Image: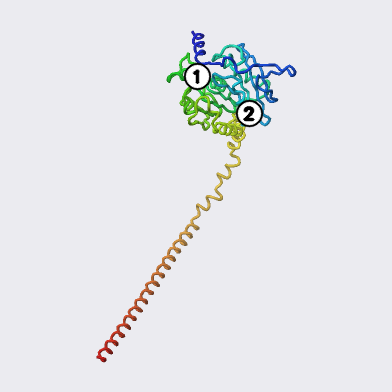
Amino acid sequence: MGGVTSSMAAKLAFFPPNPASYKVVKDEVTGLLLLSPFPHRENVEILKLPTRRGTQILTMYVRHPMASSTLLYSHGNATDLGQMYDLFIHLTIHLQVNLIGYDYSGYGQSSGKPSEQNTYADIEAVYKCLEETYGTKQEDIILYGQSVGSGPTLDLAAKLPQLRAVVLHSPILSGLRVMYPVKRSYWFDIYKNIDKIPLVNCPVLIIHGTSDEVVDCSHGKQLWELCKEKYEPLWLIGGNHCDLEQFPEYIRHLKKFITTVEKSPSQRYSFRKSMEQFEQPRKSTDVFEVSRKSTDRREKPRLSSDRPEKLKNLANNDKLERLRVTFDHIERSRRSVDCLEKSRKSFDHQLEKARKSVDRLERIRT
């Protein structure tokens, strides 16, 4: 029953390009594998990797000389390495990272058939290749999952506690939830990201278009709410399911995120070690307690009442002095007003005398 359900889910969930957009050729001189029709690049390696489920998957590794992080990219549906080639080169250059991408079983030139369990084995084989072939440490890896690629990405991320970061690009809550807004997880559902994302212990960036007609933006928003260590999400207004890389904000925000996680102590292994170093001085009280308990400098001034009393007397004297000055000022002002009043009355008296003299002269003239 489980096999039948898995087979039906695979038919609904996976759409590998047919035919593949590229071919694998072997250089006669160097013996290296190349992707045709793309020109050979010195920093690009093509490998075939065996998986634990018996398939062989094709992998593309792009090296950057200044990289301190490696992006493990799980691409979306209905595409393959040939269609992703230019984007992988572009991301490597602009983000200054190494990048490894791969085709799922049954995609491109990878053998086998696509299924949920095969994709889990596929990404595990790529991760193993990073560790064993390129010497990449877990804490230097950023897992990147686009659309259906968010399934194998989160399945692996939940098992790796020291990852540097995770990027989810137009992710799904689960396969069934893309078609129906179910409230619970059923046994026959595939890619139950909604149940796995709370188990991820590193920073998570979610990028989703608000006009996505394939996977509604609510999938990305709900996954972001469930993250343990959230990073500022990127909701691209007007973005659809397959055009987010064309927005200028996409590469800017992604670059900012990678720069942040490269410098941040949120890399779990180094963060724990640094915290242990800081924790010891914090617990030690040999230095702090003596000065804390000593009251030679603090308590004696508090207990002495001479100085406060003097200060109190000085304060009272200051108040009296200010009042005296205020009263003196009022008195001077009052005296000034009295003088002005006397001057005004004197002037009025003189005017009155002059007026009477004029009246007397007027009567004499008459």
Total number of numbered discs in the rendering: 2
324, 104: nearer the viewer: 104
Q: Residue at x 48, y 31 (%)?
A: 237
Instruction: Assign a secondary structure to mark 1.
Output: loop
Mark 2 residue type: Thr
Callout 2: SS: helix
Q: Which residue is mark 1?
A: 192
Quadrant hosting residue 110 = top right
Is there any visible trace of residue 121 in the rendered image? no
- Packing grade of label 1 (10 A; few <14, some 14-19, many >=20) is many
Residue 199 lies, in percent from the top left, at: 53, 23
Tell which of 31 and 270 is nearer to you: 31
| Residue 359 in the image, given as x and y percentages of width and height | 27, 87
Residue 105, by quadrant, is: top right
Nearer-N-terminus badge (1/2): 2
Q: Where is 119 relative to 330, above or below?
A: above
Q: Residue furthest front?
A: 37
* Residue 181 coordinates in the image, percent (x, y): 43, 20
Q: Is residue 194 above or below residue 113?
A: below
Residue 165 showing in the rendered view? yes
Q: Mark 1, mark 2: which one is toward the viewer? A: 2
Q: Quadrant of residue 251?
A: top right
Q: Which residue is rendered at x = 34% and y = 78% of the image?
A: 344
The amino acid beneath tag 1 is Lys
Name the residue that disc number 2 marks.
92
